[in-house]
Image (cartoon, grey):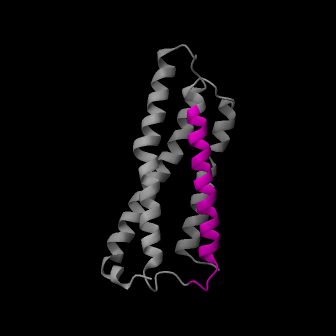
Amino acid sequence: MLSSLMPYSLWIKALHVISVIAWMAGQFYLPRLFVYHCQVKKESDENERFKIMEYKLLRYIINPAMMAAFLFGILLALIPGMINWHAKWWIIKLIALLVLTGYHGFCSRWRRQFAVDQNMHSEKFYRWINEVPTLLMIIIVIMVIVQPF
């Protein structure tokens, strides 16, 4: 535990929330791009534009935001009294976070498949998969704010 971080806890919390918002915005938008990417021909200029958009979104927004969210989240967890380690809510939150991180990995994989014109999923698949981060966000927010367990 790092009690030296206590005076900065509100700043760390604010940076964590900002990072999470940016990460989630990207997690909501990237699969939506995949939906639209499925609708274009492989040999079109639009196809190439989607590849660039997906790459830049993941590389310059989603990945850095995820890393910042983890960094600030870990710092928050290290501040004494920030988490009641005897409660169960943080375990559920951690599991949802790990699933969200796995989802992030799948999105990265799907982006790489689109980049080489090897997408294996339908527009409908991406429409459904786009709901996953919303469900995980609901679980995480309830665990952190309500702390029901």
Front position in the image: 8 or 38: 8
Q: Quadrant of the N terminus?
A: bottom left
Seen in the picture, residue 130 relative to 115 is either above or below; the reply is below
Residue 56 percent location from the top left of the image: 42, 36
Residue 119 percent location from the top left of the image: 64, 28
Does the segment drawn in magenta span residue 94?
yes
Residue 53 percent location from the top left of the image: 44, 32
- The residue located at (63%, 73%) in the rendering is 91
Q: Does residue 120 appear to the left or right of 79 in the view shown?
A: right
Q: Quadrant of the C terminus?
A: bottom right
Seen in the picture, residue 73 relative to 53 is either above or below; the reply is below
Residue 76 placement: quadrant: bottom left
Seen in the picture, residue 123 relative to 63 is either above or below; the reply is above
Residue 116 placement: quadrant: top right
- The residue located at (36%, 64%) in the rendering is 15
Residue 121 percent location from the top left of the image: 69, 31
Residue stretch rendered in magenta on the structure: 85-112
Q: Is residue 134 visible?
A: no
